[in-house]
Image (spheres, rainbow, N blue to C red):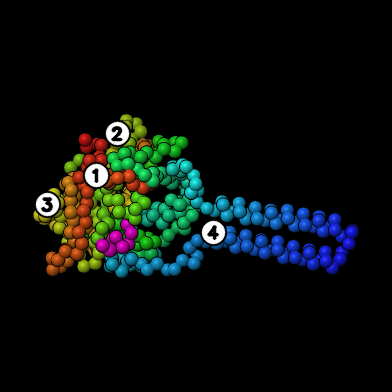
Amino acid sequence: MAQVKPQSHASLKRWLIASGAVLLLAMLLIAGRQPDTASAHNDFCTEQSGGGWYCIWYDPSLAPATPHWFNAAVTLRSWNYAAVSDGHGGTVTQKCVHMMRGSDGYTMQLFCGSGVPQGYTPGYMRPGYLFTRHGAGGARYITGDGAH
Amino acid sequence: MTQMTRNKTHLMGAITLALAVTGVALILATQSPDATSAPVETPASKVEVLQPATADALNAVPEETRMQLDYMTARPALVSEGAAAAVEVSEVGVVNRADGTEVTVAAIGEDICAFLAGGVGGCDDGKRVAAGQSFSAEPIGCDGYRVLGIAPDGVTEIAIDSQADGSVDVTLPVTSNVYVGTLDPVQTVATGLDEAGEPRFSVGIPLDSYAAMNEACK
């Protein structure tokens, strides 16, 4: 028994290392699959599989009449599609998405409505900057998204 | 190796295997969040223009609008950074209106969408659509807004009260659940009427608010 004990300790150590590695791997993989709920950023873009980019920006507490600009690292983009939605089941009817032309600052209201109003941007507005705005009676969760 | 050592080794192996299986199960569970979801009742029963999205039905959709449908099917996954699955177009219908405009209506996930060819479009929760509460608008210069709305079955025309003062200023025909009209930029109430002229729903369309937010027209 005196000779077995060291082997048992070594075996236990190997088992603990192996188990720890399995657990760590599992936790890392699980964490990698979760949405980034703790992140402070509210603008991000994702490259689409078919080419092009999809971008989103949101403010959980956007004050009325306040422009909320897409504000990632590169803001001037050739947006060809834009949409706006709300975090209140689509009931914020007084919301719109706008675009400002990069060349001269001309601003155009694109689409407004209930749910998720959306559509193509005019070619003469590209490249430009996107922003959302709402006219509800208090702060609202407003999300803008676009593709280019 | 003693019997006790062999037993310990087997026990450790079993525990390691159990941990690994649990980890893999957890990973698979997080990769398929909707795998066990109960089927959602389609909201299309209230919008008869919608038909099953067969290959032929989808081929009838204008190319430009098909790209819009693709955008909406991919959007849930994109918005959630991959946490939600993409959805599919389950039903679709193309409406050719008497004024020459073409509108595509589609059921996508739990939403119903309407897209005016070459113009405005939007999606809304199926229950809101069934209650006549879905509309989208785009400015036509500074003089008005082109409004696209979806009306539930049984609604034949929309009475527009452009000042929200109780009087009907204009009526818009409903063609296959869809109405389109260019309206003044003022507070507006749209009331859906059935064949007997009875109101089926009423919805406020805040065109005055949209105009107030339109910097180009100030």
Label annotation for residue B165? 3
Neighbourhood count class around disc 4 (C-alpha, 10 Å): few under 14, some 14–19, many 20 upward: some
Neighbourhood count class around disc 3 (C-alpha, 10 Å): few under 14, some 14–19, many 20 upward: few
Q: Quadrant of the N terminus of chain B?
A: bottom right
Magenta-colored span: B123-131
Q: Secondary structure at mark 1?
A: helix
Label annotation for residue A106? 2
Q: Secondary structure at mark 3?
A: loop
Q: Chain of mark 1?
A: B
Q: Nearer the viewer, mark 1 or mark 2?
A: 1
Label 3 and label 2: CA atoms lie apart by 35 Å
Q: Amino acid at mark 3?
A: Asp
> On the image, numbered disc 1 is attached to which residue?
B210
Q: Nearer the viewer, mark 4 or mark 2?
A: 4
Residue B99 counted in the magenta span: no
Which numbered disc, 4 or 3, marks the residue that appears first in the sequence?
Answer: 4
Label 1 and label 2: CA atoms lie apart by 17 Å
Q: Secondary structure at mark 4?
A: helix
Horizontal and vertical percent position of residue B11: 75, 65
Label 3 and label 1: CA atoms lie apart by 19 Å
- In this rendering, the answer to whether A127 lies above or below B125 is above
> On the image, numbered disc 4 is attached to which residue?
B30
At 66% from the left and 61% from the top, the residue drawn is B19
Q: Amino acid at mark 4?
A: Thr
At 56% from the left and 52% from the top, the residue drawn is A31
